Image (cartoon, rainbow, N blue to C red):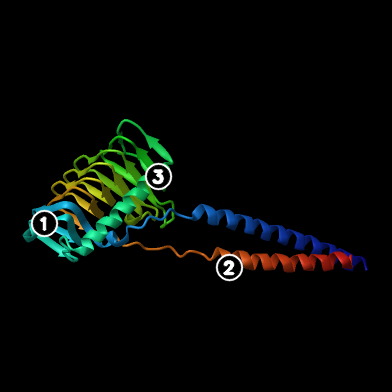
Amino acid sequence: MKTNHLMTGVSVSATRMLIGSVLAAVVWLAGHEARATPIVISLGTASHFGVLAGSGITITGPTSITGDIGSSPTPAITGLANLNLNGVNQAGNAVTQTAQNDLATAYNAVAGLAANATYTGGADLGGQTLTAGVYNDNSSIFLTGTLTLDGQGNPDAVFFIQVGSTLITATDSSVVLINGAQACHVYWQIGSSATLGTGTDFVGNLLALTSITLDAGASLDGRALAENGAVTLDNNNITMPVCLSAAVPDHGSTLLMLGCGCAGLLGLGRRFAVAV
């Protein structure tokens, strides 16, 4: 009998420890699920465009674009002989007009996000490493050197940079993605115009209220989307990024299973307690 009581006591203790572990897992999963939920901004039909303008597109020198191109309400596109297009020239048709409407919606959505970090007086992001979040400077933003965007192992990490006025990069500057960060999840909301300097290697979706200029040799892993102004290109490569989604665990089902396990273990614990 003593042996049986001892075994029962051990079983009850083990059961209680297991229940505690399961409850801790439930709490962790619930908190983790809330923290992992990313901000989602839709570009709508503008997502099909590598280059979208409001008052025309000018192409100087051999330029390669992956994605559609178009301009509305001014449909002029000059320098098409210099363009290697892996997409559709939508010119100023209804598709382009709809894309401009969707761009305006996306621009306003990004502009309306609350900032996690605020700069003043025209910050230079060169030499900095940023993690997912919303960054704001009501003035201009500059890039001299290298900006690193760190996904911290999360391919769904999203980066928003709100620029009150102009975005300007120096010659041979670059944006580097590490630890799972993806170009498709980088958004630059620009209150005026963007200029990527000569040889710049840039990343992300440029959402400019006015114009976008890529100087000679600049490349963009992203989209050049201008609402009201022109897009000017000079011997550039623009590649529309493709998002690779992470496998998202079904935390709801996991929590349900853990809850059922807790209920069963509690019942088992009661049986042991009665036996004692």
Query: Which is more toward the observer, 257 or 151?
Result: 257
Callout 3: 10 Å neighbours few (<14), some, many (20+)? Answer: many
Nearest to N terminus: mark 2 or mark 1: 1
Alpha carbon of mark 1 to alpha carbon of mark 3: how far?
34 Å
Helix, strand or loop status at disc 3: strand
Q: In this view, does 252 lie to the left or right of 212?
A: right
From the image, tell me which residue sits under label 1. Answer: 77
- Taking the view exactly as shown, the residue that stands out farthest to the top is 121
The residue lying at 19 percent from left, 41 percent from top is 171
**Which quadrant of the rendered structure holds the N terminus?**
bottom right
Q: Which of marks 1 and 3 is in front?
A: 1
Tag 3 or tag 1, which sits nearer the N-term? 1
- Residue that carries the numbered disc 3 in the rendered image: 134
Q: Which amino acid does label 2 sit on?
A: Ser
Q: Which mark is residue 253?
A: 2
Judge from the rendering whether residue 134 lies leftward or rightward of residue 53; answer left or right.
right
The one nearer the camera, 138 or 244, is 138
Camera-near label (2 vs 1) is 1
**Callout 1 amino acid:** Ile
**Badge 2 or badge 3: first in the primary sequence:** 3
Query: Can residue 240 be seen in the rendering of this structure?
Result: no
Q: What element carries label 2?
A: helix
Image quadrant where residue 253 sits: bottom right
